[in-house]
Amino acid sequence: MSTSFGLCVFETILCVSFILLVFVSVCGHTVYTCLLGAVLYVCYWIIRKVGRNRVDIHGKYVLITGCDTGFGNSLARLMDIKGLNVIAACLSVESDGAKQLKTTGSRRMCVLQLDVTSDESVASCLQRVKTLCHKEGLWALINNAGILYTGDVEVQTMAVYRRVAEVNLFGMVRICKAFLPLVRQRKGRVINVTSVRGLLAGPAHSAYVMSKFGAEGFTDCLRLEMRRFGVKVILIQPGSFGLSTGLFSVENVRRQKVAYQQLIDSVDDETRAAYGQDYLDTYLRVPKMNSKSSDKDLKRVLDAFEDAILSTNPDSRYLVDGIRHWIDVLCMMARLRNVLPVSLMDALYLWLQPMPKEAFHKT
């Protein structure tokens, strides 16, 4: 049986099952509804798997932001190995990650400087990219650059809120607006990296969560707008990969500790008394990057990126469970959030992700 014929058969079963599902649901047959729902689910995923062909990579260019460390750096190396023309955008071309890409990458690898918060930097990068791929267009635009700062709402500064939003949200918007014409030219795809935190809120994460929730909404709007141009818009939502990424590299940990110390020192007396000095000092407990971190640690999320970039029929969203434990608690709760009542979700979150004990023992 050919792949196309097989797909037609399964698509027919899917349509018939959906019609029957609606009918038996209206008639109130709970058991039949569950059985047909299961058939519908299985058929859908068979169609997804059967239709997973790969695109021809010849002449295809991909632009990846945030390649100094973490996902971006590992993805740039992976796509280079796969044979694509990789344009790796780094905040600094003198960073260790940028130097690594230039040293170990193939002749197809191009490392460019890019600050996603700067109109001038984006315009300069765009001109370079146009020169590289003006005839081919851009097959994939991967918005990966991001930063993370934590802090309770009453304690966090407006400057940090603006900084996080400028990178994680408006940086994504700025890059999309600049490079979409090249993506449309190629009928390619935009891949925006958010986070499980774009689905699930948590204490002391408001700046980061706001930016990621916003990026999710922006991506959904863009997906609908680009559909008529044949451009696919995809979300990658990594779970608990933090200690295997550049968010907690030595340099970023140093930078965050300096910022958190300044934040603690700036707190007014009333807020300090309400929250307690011991709790405020917990901000300085910035975890360090896992010393055993490697591309193997990131395999699940790199596999999701690869499918989003190279599959002819990619998913619209990839919620990728992290690998630190046997289950990614945050991803599990993200999947439950539209099922359980808010009061139960809040209680479950604080049970599975408890606040520091200092939050309840003020000085």
Image (spheres, rainbow, N blue to C red):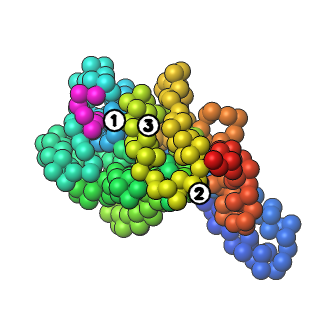
Name the residue carrying label 2: 274
Q: Which residue is drawn at 46% across and 46% down?
A: 264
Asked if residue 29 is positioned above or below residue 345 in the image, the reply reads below
**Which mark is first along the chain, 1 or 2?**
1
Q: Residue at x 59, y 50 (%)?
A: 276
Say which amino acid is labelled 2.
Ala
Question: Which label is found at residue 105?
Answer: none
Residue 167's x, y, as percent? Answer: 34, 51
What segment is highlighted magenta in the picture? 87-95
Q: Residue at x 27, y 19 (%)?
A: 103
Which of 115/159 is in front? 159
Q: Is residue 30 left or right of residue 184?
A: right
Name the residue carrying label 3: 257
Q: Do the residues labelled 1 and 3 touch (CB within 8 Å)?
A: no
Question: Judging from the image, what secondary structure is the residue with disc 2 in?
Answer: helix
Total marks in image? 3
Name the residue carrying label 1: 67
Say which amino acid is labelled 3.
Lys
Question: Judging from the image, what secondary structure is the residue with disc 3 in?
Answer: helix
Say which amino acid is labelled 1.
Cys
Q: How far apart are marks 2 and 3 (CA)?
A: 22 Å
Residue 118 appears in the picture as rendered: yes
Q: Residue at x 48, y 26 (%)?
A: 295
Q: Is residue 227 left or right of residue 287?
A: left
